[in-house]
Image (cartoon, rainbow, N blue to C red):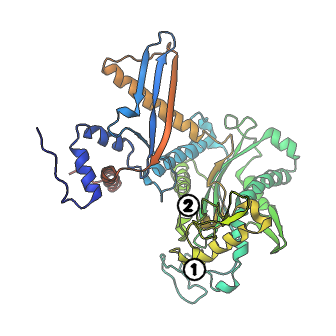
Amino acid sequence: MRRPLDLRHVTSPGLRDLIELANTPDFDRVTEQIRDLRGCTSPVNLHGWTLTTDQTTKEVVRSYRSEDEPSGRLLTACGNRRASRCPACSRVYAADTYHLIKAGLSGGKNVAETVRNHPRAFVTLTAPSFGPVHNRPTTDAGRLRPCACGETHAEDAPELGTPLNPAAYDYTGAVLWNAHAGQLWARFTTYLRRALAEHLDMSQKALNTALRVSFAKVAEYQKRGLVHFHAVIRFDGPDGHTTEPPAWATFDALRVAVGLAVERARLTVESNSIGERVIAWGGRYKVDPISALDSGELTDAKVAGYVAKYATKNAEGTGTVDRTLMCRPCTGRGYVRGPDRFHDMCADCDGTGQAEPIKALPVQQHVRQMIRTAWALGHLPEFAELKLWKWAHMLGFRGHFSTKSRAYSTTLGALRDVRRAWRVAQAEAARARAGLPTSDENTTLVTASSWTYLSSGYRPGEELLAAQVRHDIAHAERIKSEGEPWL
């Protein structure tokens, strides 16, 4: 009989828990479950069961119970798209986004391959200026010039993007622009079609009958804390990507229409506190052709990779935090409704509405001031619907980071369904090899399940195993990128 290990000398809770796990007969299953997550940083813990039966014979084809796991729970990937939260799941999201964008440029994934012959453009739309900031200007020849402050900043200089004169910077305008950027994009797509019809000297009804404009876009934060959009815009025939666009629907027409739409797209915001503000695009925008050939500057693969990279980023590139500052018990209001229907001060945030004080955040002053401005504007009655206190950590931006028109290409859901079907097929093949009952094309399966959320995260020992998985994956990717042979 084995004597139990004496772990009193082990001071690390994680190491103590790992040793205990390693001395259980089910340790292989523990490591297998964690490796299947491929390094997810905060897996979802579930408790429940799934039962799949043949509707005709009532034979059980597949069954699973979380109680049969060594820990009594099932670990599933969190699925977070943000690289700052979960690098593992964000890599999957980035890969799906890459294939979604690439399919709309080169075909595949149920998109006609002839789509690569359609006029396509990579469009960049930026925010206007709300005050001069430190930057790295260049000459027409690409040579670096001194900033307006007189210095030549390094690429990683912390002052880049911060105002030259913070007292004169329009923080209110900057936050409101971020808050309405999504609506401004929607307004832009409307004016794009109108401008195109005007440029081609035809009615909008006739244009819509002969042409369909498809797009996919992603948002990116600039160092100054303002979002700008990168978009793939494509001309299709009336039935979408399966039909060729008319001969008069050229890249030049698209470029002219984008310029007109940028000038005309406007939103007016009225407030008793700050007066009237006009939300518009900045004067700097780019419309570049996308080449179907590898020799082009912007190829299908390069554009898809560029969009996929920014689809997993948040505002952390500007130096802000990646978590909401809203106190959840009082939802940022600073008070809760008591039993006598009177408002009582929230004890969790001492009435501030903040989960953590803004003045204590580890951010630079420019970012802190944008957060403060978003928080203050969010509590004005005329901006209550914007819920800016909820999105203060995002510097006011509350839109989706990546969106697409319905007919651009496939969907993220369809890509996940394909991946799920592949996993089911692999499981069926494994059951067949083990001599267990499987389903075939003529079998009608009925699945019943019941699942309950328990928590998120790992046990201390499991976290050490997950860290090793992340290290192994990163090492393999580094070796692959460097092209070095395995030693």
Front-most of 372 and 159? 372
State the residue in front, 394 or 453. Answer: 453
- As drawn, 395 above or below 338: below
Residue 284 falls left or right of residue 64: right
Q: Is residue 90 left or right of residue 71?
A: right
Tell me the quadrant of the picture where the N terminus can be found. top left
Label 2, secondary structure: give it.
loop
Q: Residue at x 54, y 47 (%)?
A: 97
Q: Nearer the viewer, residue 363 or 440?
A: 363
- Mark positioned earlier in the residue sequence (2 or 1): 2
In the rendering, at what x and y percent does residue 6 appear? 16, 52
Residue bearing the label numbered 1 = 365
According to the image, label 2 marks what residue?
314
Three-letter amino acid code of the residue under disc 1: Gln
Three-letter amino acid code of the residue under disc 2: Asn
Residue 240 locus on image (x, y percent): 70, 37
| Residue 334 percent across, percent down from the top left | 66, 67
Q: Residue furthest bottom?
A: 150
Marks 2/1: CA distance?
19 Å
- Local packing at callout 2 (Cα closer than 10 Å; few below 14, some 14-19, many 20+) is many
Occupied quadrant, residue 306: bottom right
Q: Position of residue 445 (x, y in %)?
A: 51, 18
